[in-house]
Image (cartoon, grey):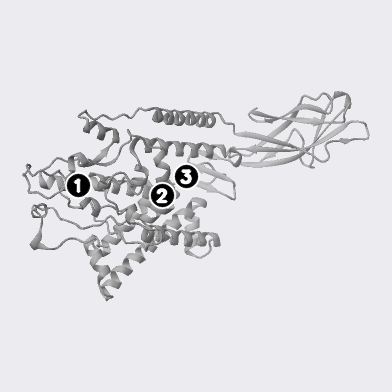
Amino acid sequence: MVDQAVVQDATAKPAAQREGVERSDAEPVNKKERRSLYQKRIKIYPRLARGSFRRLKWIVMAATLAVYYVTPWLRWDRGANAPDQAVLIDFPGRRFYFFFIEIWPQEVYYLTGLLILAAIGLFLVTSLAGRVWCGYTCPQTVWTDLFIAVERFFQGDRASRIRLDKMPLSVNKIVRKGATHVTWLVIGALTGGAWVFYFADAPTLATQLATFEAPAIAYVTIGTLTFTTYLLGGLAREQVCTYMCPWPRIQGGLLDEESLVITYHEDRGEPRGARKKGVTDTGLGDCVDCNQCVAVCPMGIDIRDGQQLECITCALCIDACDQVMDKVGLPRGLISYDTLANVERARAGEKPRLRLIRPRTVVYTAIIVVVSLIMLFTLATRSDLDVNVLRDRNPLFVALSDGSIRNGYTVKIINKQHDARVFSLRLEGLAGATLDVVGADVTADDLPVGPDSLESYRVFVAAPPAALEGDSTDIRFQVVDKASGTAVSYDSVFRGPDR
């Protein structure tokens, strides 16, 4: 197989190369027809692209990495009895903190809402502009971009990396290769380190890690993420997108003919061939067959072969092609973001148009708006007090010596404020009932609950048989904050003998 190298034969330069267009014999080694499940990976050496989309990718990479690495160190004052880390997944305390939002375990439905928003948002973006998530913000893409940048820094651009790999072992090769892999491992360790900081107070855990006093699970997690980051970003790269990720297979059901995708305009580009700058009557299309779009592709495909599962819509081929078009004096846009419908319109002589508002985009947007409004409403109206009551199932009831019937309950009071509170417990719906709380220091009118915590109380309810409505009577427990008067209730039943 031809390697991805630059043609260096100065005596046989095509016209396009004589005019300053470098001709590359880069091969689309990852295209479906050239790929086998049992074939050893053919290394891809993507060339550095220059242009607006490459600049956008640098900006997105810097922003996403900054968010990931910096977020655990942000502080947020929640008061004296709560952690001050802005984003914290507190497993021991069973809380999730996100700036001013605090999520309790029983509020896991907020996580469900976030997952729905993320999924539908991804569907919407894909239906509008293809796999831009994959091309710009997917962690695999971001870290692979970073690793390639490190590789390029120590080993040079594509041609230099190819030559280095072909060179016999030497001190220079060991140093450059070693520096590359050591830096990859450092990035992997920083990635794992940043991840564990989301699950504990970052400054405290950082000190513990440095003094080898951190929990063993922290070191195991960092080691695991160091290895996986190094493997996926440094070695596997495009293999992850091609074989491991399900998204390329799913996207086929989300795209339609009006979705923006990376498009090679075949009607304009074919037949391919080199030409001198300014010469137009050659009978050739605008594609000078320089292969620069293949040389810059991190997935190792040729966009001129049409839509492909492997394409991550990074648009680097657009930058490469636009540069070539500038050099040969032809209009930009031979490769561009366009829709399949516009390709057909161009062939029919119609004007192109962009249809962002379509049935599927309207449905996706409506779902996002509805779910967002529901989540905002529940967040804005949720109480800082909650109660849960569990009735004893065995025995269902106990007949006391005075003839009354007694049921046992476990009342769990959740105080979501960061201050201690005292509550009273009341019972409704059962005339003549008595309510007793187990414990020497507590009564039904004096139930303390600590700040940002849950307290369970064992409660017995006794009632005369005449007050019962058959073998099951509906009752309601009410918990009232004695200071503010805030109240919440919980419906339950009182069981008795058949009548």
* 3 or 1: tag closer to the N-terminus: 3
- Who is closer to the viewer here, 97 or 163? 163
Q: Is residue 368 left or right of residue 269?
A: right
Q: Nearer the viewer, residue 191 or 176?
A: 176
Q: Nearer the viewer, mark 2 or mark 1?
A: 1
Q: Residue 28, how many percent across, how many down?
A: 28, 55
Which image quadrant: the N terminus?
bottom left
Locate residue 348 relative to residue 83 in the image: left or right: left
Measuring from the top left, give residue 27's x and y in whole percent. 25, 57
Dot 1 amino acid type: Cys
Query: Mark on residue 413?
Result: none
Number of residues whose C-alpha sits closer than 10 Å to that of mark 1, classed few (under 14), some (14–19) or many (20 or more):
many
Residues tagged 3 and 2 counted as in contact (Cβ below 8 A): no
x 37%, y 43%: residue? 133
Alpha carbons under labels 3 and 1: distance apart: 44 Å
* Residue that badge 2 annotates: 68
The answer to whether the residues at label 2 and label 1 have Cβ atoms under 8 Å apart is: no
Residue 352, horizontal then vertical, whole percent:
23, 30
Provide the secondary structure element on which disc 1 rests: helix
> How many residues crowd around disc 3 within 10 Å: few (fewer than 14), some, or many (20 or more)?
many
- Amino acid type, mark 2: Tyr
Q: Is residue 433 left or right of residue 151?
A: right
Residue visible at 40% across and 35% down in the picture: 124
* Residue 96, placed above or below residue 35: above
Mark carried by residue 86: 3
The quadrant in which residue 154 appears is bottom left
Mark before the other along the chain sequence, 3 or 2:
2
Residue assigned mark 1: 321
Q: CA distance from mark 2 to mark 1?
A: 33 Å
Side (left or right) of 80 relative to 306: right
- Front residue of this view, candidates 105 and 289: 289
Answer whether residue 215 is visible to the viewer in this image.
no
